[in-house]
């Protein structure tokens, strides 16, 4: 029995495709939950920001191992200003809670990391975008300048509210480090995340001063720098990549 060159070439191409296909498929869990926490830093209408803290929990659905949609809840403290050093003697403390829906896409969705140590190491790098609400609870704020203020002692009250709900848009940049279980499945993740939160409204710092008197043009923001852990669970799904 003989094979023509065309048939031999066709079989070779088909075999190569099947080998590539077999190496490019894997199984993954469709759900994960995670916990994390870290420090935050504010940028609001007061001149100086300050450090606070954030604790977070999340649950995610995995469309692929590298594309997820989920919900994140946060609780923390955002603060800024200083009654002594601020030019207007303003300062605030906000014990906030927030809930956001987030979409995240990891580098592993676009690169071939099989047997490539560099890409394997950074396949969990991701970008994310979300939207949600933040519930502001101002627990400490300067509404009147102190009597010893250098300019306009006793001036006030600074306008604004102590409680309110605003729209919030988080932007995430981070890295997932994957850990397999005893059966070879990715079951655990150590997560490093940097998140910029843009709030729309004047509730984050509790000040709503007219821009004719105070600088008040940009959205109030706070950045969260966190470390977390994630656990995968649920049904197992096949994942196939064609490269």
Image: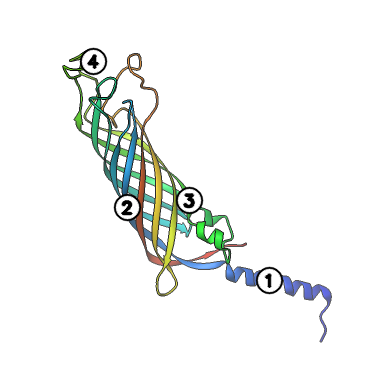
Mark 1, mark 3: which one is toward the viewer?
A: 3
Mark 1, mark 4: which one is toward the viewer?
A: 4
Q: Position of residue 195 (x, y in %)?
A: 39, 43
Q: Earlier in the sequence, mark 1 or mark 3?
A: 1
Q: Earlier in the sequence, mark 2 or mark 1?
A: 1
Q: Quadrant of residue 141?
A: top left
**Residue at position x 59%, y 60% from top?**
112
Mark drawn on residue 16: 1
Q: Quadrant of the C terminus?
A: bottom right
Q: Quadrant of residue 138?
A: top left
Mark 2, mark 1: which one is toward the viewer?
A: 2
**Element class at badge 2:** strand
Q: Earlier in the sequence, mark 1 or mark 4?
A: 1
Find disc 2 in the rendering and name its residue.
36
Q: Position of residue 46 (x, y in %)?
A: 31, 26
Q: Gap between marks 1 and 4, in whole Å?
A: 79 Å
Q: Quadrant of residue 212?
A: top left
Q: Position of residue 227 (x, y in %)?
A: 35, 52
Q: Earlier in the sequence, mark 4 or mark 2?
A: 2
Residue 218 horizontal side relative to residue 1, left or right: left
The foreground one among 48 and 226 is: 48
Q: Earlier in the sequence, mark 4 or mark 3?
A: 3
Find disc 4 in the rendering and name its residue.
150
Circles 2 and 3, Cβ within 8 Å, touching? The answer is: no
Residue 64 horizontal side relative to residue 158, left or right: right
Circles 2 and 1, Cβ within 8 Å, touching? The answer is: no
Find disc 3 in the rendering and name its residue.
126
Colouring used for the render: rainbow
């Amino acid at each position: 029995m003989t094979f023509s060159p065309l048939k031999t070439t066709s079989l070779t191409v088909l075999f190569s495709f099947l080998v590539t296909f077999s190496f490019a498929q894997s199984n993954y869990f469709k759900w994960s939950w995670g916990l994390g926490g870290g420090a935050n830093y504010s940028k609001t209408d007061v001149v100086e920001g300050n450090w606070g803290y954030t604790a977070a929990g999340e649950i995610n659905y995995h469309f692929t191992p590298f594309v997820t949609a989920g919900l994140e809840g946060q609780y923390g403290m955002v603060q800024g200003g200083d009654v002594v050093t601020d030019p207007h003697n303003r300062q605030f403390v906000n014990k906030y809670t927030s809930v956001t829906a987030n979409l995240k896409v990891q580098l592993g969705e676009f690169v071939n990391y099989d047997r490539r140590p560099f890409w394997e190491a950074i396949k969990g790098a991701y970008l994310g975008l979300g939207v949600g609400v933040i519930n502001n609870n101002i627990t400490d704020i300067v509404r009147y300048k102190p009597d010893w203020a250098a300019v306009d002692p006793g001036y006030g009250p600074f306008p604004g509210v102590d409680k309110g709900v605003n729209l919030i848009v988080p932007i995430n940049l981070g890295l997932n480090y994957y850990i397999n279980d005893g059966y070879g499945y990715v079951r655990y993740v150590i997560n490093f995340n940097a998140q910029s939160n843009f709030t729309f409204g004047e509730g984050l710092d509790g000040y709503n001063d007219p821009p004719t008197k105070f600088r008040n043009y940009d959205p109030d923001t706070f950045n969260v720098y966190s470390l977390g852990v994630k656990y995968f669970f649920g049904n197992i799904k096949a994942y196939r990549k064609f490269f």
